[in-house]
Image (cartoon, helix red, strand yellow):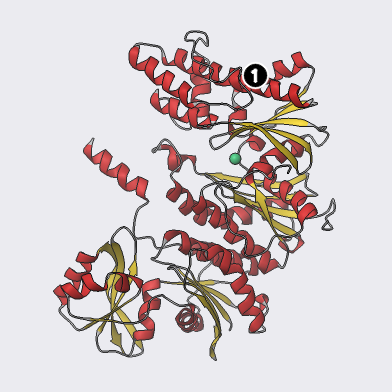
Amino acid sequence: MLILGIETATAQVSVAIGGHEGVIALFEVARGRRHAEILAPAVEFVCRQADIELDELGVIAVDTGPGLFTGMRVGLASAKALAQALRIPMIGISSLDLLAFPNRHTDRVVVPVIDARKGEVFWAMYRQVPGGLQQVAPPTVGPVDDLVADLLARSQEALCIGDGAHRYREEILDGYHCEIGEDAHPSAAPLVQLAHARALREEWVNPREITATYLRAPDAQINWSTRERRA
Amino acid sequence: MYPVTADTLVLGIETSCDETAAALVMGGADVISSVVSSQVDLHADFGGVVPEIASRAHLDVLNPVVARAIVEAGVDERRIDAVACTVGPGLIGALLVGVSAAKAFALAWDVPFVAVNHMEAHLYAAFLEDPTLEFPLVVLLVSGGHTMIVEMRDHGDYTLLGRTIDDAAGEAFDKVARFLDLGYPGGPAIDAAALEGDPEAIRFPRAMLDDGLDVSFSGLKTAVMNHVRRNPDVSSADVAASFQAAVVDVLVTKARRAARQVGATGIVLGGGVAANSLLREELLGACAADDLQGFLPSREMCTDNAAMIAAAGWHRLRIDGPSPLDTGAHPNLALPLRP
Ligand SMILES: [Zn+2]
């Protein structure tokens, strides 16, 4: 079964095709705020270079966030439309799972940290278990101080990765002794790998059931509810 | 020239503001289906469109809206010849949902993608209901996001004659309605309240009435607020009626002047504010007095919809051919004007 993976939750646009032979094709551009311009040509390019017609695909996999809202929605809207038009199912996977997965062969706690802007980060924590990773702390959004407090509370050897870990390297290292890994962005390569395992178990959904994970209410709603409470 | 025919079936997609819409239109004129999902309830608490809320809602409802447009049309989706979508102007996050989905549909079905200017599409709304309209026309386009007077000499041939230098007309309606506690959206709220009031109770200023074809509503909005603050017991109905009379007076005077200036055969109304009953009545009266055709499209065609996007897309495909897949969204996209 061929799977097209689409990942746009951070500054990177990543598109991959994979199947039981693993990842067949991968396209990545990591500098940009031009997700919508890049993504559709990237899908076309990856398919052409891998010599795969879109109607040979069996599943569309997509990163459902958390991440930067606008970029994330470019990937989600594209992936959902592709699946709907091709009449195939979808598999949605969290950006934090995707960042953690390539670092599954460590004894340490794996902590993907994604920049959430406004001085905040998205993070979760994972531990190695036979056959992969298990989430030990759920996806959270908050200031870097909260992440540091979370690390201190656990007091375990930790590996922090992701653009949030890079951006706040000093704040994190000042508060907690850990390693900052190189991985900066979730990629569509682990996306198709993880999705393939799920596809074998037919753990897929209708495109309509794929929704974004924001972890944060829209700004106006935040302002509004604080105003309501004050009033 | 790209080969399009009267049988060319275009799927239109619109997500530039707070309506998620999809439609199938044949030959740029024949509306086979048109589905609009309004988010007005989601924004009502805030008295205006909240961009992030709009973007989230577009992502959630676009797929079902497209599916419904196809089912209601009763055609096989493989019959669709092109996918047209608003690429601007509008809210960037909202536009990006539609543009991304539209390009993906086009890619999956292996048909052309067509980038459509939302303002140009509004001009085409009138032709969906009256294909016999004769050029040159003056189009008065008034909504929450835009207020402009455009001369249309032919398909694809536009000259901007006038525009608002500050607030859009619909925006002024929303702000005044919110100030008077009449509810959201402001257009229908003011329209309803005005029916009970006296339009001559208060003489609000008509900014730039004798001066060119541009309009300005920000001073009027301030005048309304000052008047109410100074006269706390004033009837809201009188304020609404007098405010509406001032807006309509300015819009109709300018549209009339524009038609005279370019020798138009008629005036076409478009945009959400075109549903305003006083504006409709006054514009028809003015057209009759000046011996012009006056055309008022239905409310469904005046407000944001995807049938107008599909229609404009058909014309754009004929004139320019398919748009590249690396097309993005352009929040401040201007109307393609005559050079
Ligand atoms: Zn509009």
What's the chain of the residue with tag 1?
B
Residue at horizontal 52 percent and vertical 62 percent from the top: A74
Q: Position of residue B199 (x, y in %)?
A: 52, 11
In the image, B164: left or right of A134? right
Q: Is residue A174 left or right of residue B16?
A: left
Q: Quarter of the image holding residue A89?
A: bottom right
Which is nearer the eye, B107 or B189? B107
Bin the neighbour count of mark 1 within 10 Å (Cα to Cα): few under 14, some 14-19, many 20 and up.
some
Q: Name the quarter where the N terminus of chain B is drawn.
A: bottom right
Under mark 1, the amino acid is Thr
Could you tell me which residue is drawn at 59 percent across and 25 percent down? B276
- Percent position of residue B308, x then y: 69, 44
Q: Which residue is mark 1?
A: B253
Relative to residue A222, is residue A79 depicted above or below? below
Q: Is residue A57 visible?
A: no
Residue drawn at x 63%, y 57% is: B67
SS class, disc 1: helix
In front of the other: B72 or B59:
B59
Q: How far from the left and from the top, in percent, is residue B124?
A: 72, 40
Quadrant observed for ligand 1 in the rendered image: top right
Residue B134, horizontal then vertical, whole percent: 83, 32
The image quadrant that residue A137 belongs to is bottom left
**Nearer to me, A94 or B163:** B163
Quadrant in the rendering for residue B152: top right
Observer-nearest of A132 and B161:
B161
Q: Quadrant of the C terminus of chain B?
A: top right
Give the answer, above or below, for where A151 lies relative to B84: below
Q: Is residue B338 visible?
A: yes
Which residue shows up at 17% across the image and 69% down it? A149
Dot 1 beta carbon under 8 Å from ligand 1: no
